Amino acid sequence: MSRIKSVLGNERGFMLLNVVFLTVITSLAAMILMNAAPRARNHQSTLRLTAIYLANEQFAELESLAAREDISGSQPFLGNKDDLTSNNLGANNPIEFKVTTTVSGGRAKVKVTWQVGDDEFKIEMERTIGIVQE
């Protein structure tokens, strides 16, 4: 029995060193992962949200225009032209959005396209243009 106690008594310092080393290694791994997280952002989701914003802005402008006059056919982008450029990939790599709109029978179709490198992306949305009259 005393032999077991002497063996276990010598192991206490060894276990403490194991815990310290494990804590240091885990902390270093966490710091590396936290440092790498901003570089692994998904730029496409941000660009897609920008495209959805542009389509919704176009719908709002079309409804405003339809309240004043009859609209049909192809329409230019009616929102702020500065919104058509995004610097989400950095100031040296601006992304240009193209918004094409057709209105027919009270329905508007908006298509937003953009290109990143050789890949082209698009979203298409369709909505009834509501006109509020007093």
Image (cartoon, helix red, strand yellow):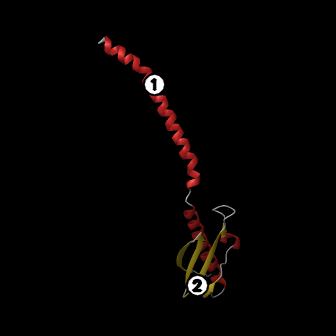
Q: Residue at x 56, y 46 (%)?
A: 34
Q: Which mark is residue 102?
A: 2
Which quadrant of the view contains residue 4?
A: top left
Which quadrant of the view contains residue 61?
A: bottom right
Does residue 10 sit above or below 111 in this rendering?
above
Q: Nearer the viewer, residue 92 or 99?
A: 92
Sequence-first disc among 2 and 1: 1
Residue labelled with disc 1: 16
Q: Residue at x 55, y 64 (%)?
A: 44
Q: Nearer the viewer, mark 2 or mark 1?
A: 1
The extreme top residue here reads 2
Q: Within 10 angstroms of label 2, few (less than 14), some, or many (20 or more) residues?
A: some
Does residue 84 sit above or below 16 in this rendering?
below
Q: Nearer the viewer, residue 115 or 113?
A: 115
Q: Nearer the viewer, residue 113 or 62?
A: 113
Which quadrant of the view contains residue 114?
A: bottom right
Q: Secondary structure at mark 1?
A: helix
Q: Secondary structure at mark 2?
A: strand
Q: Which mark is residue 59?
A: none
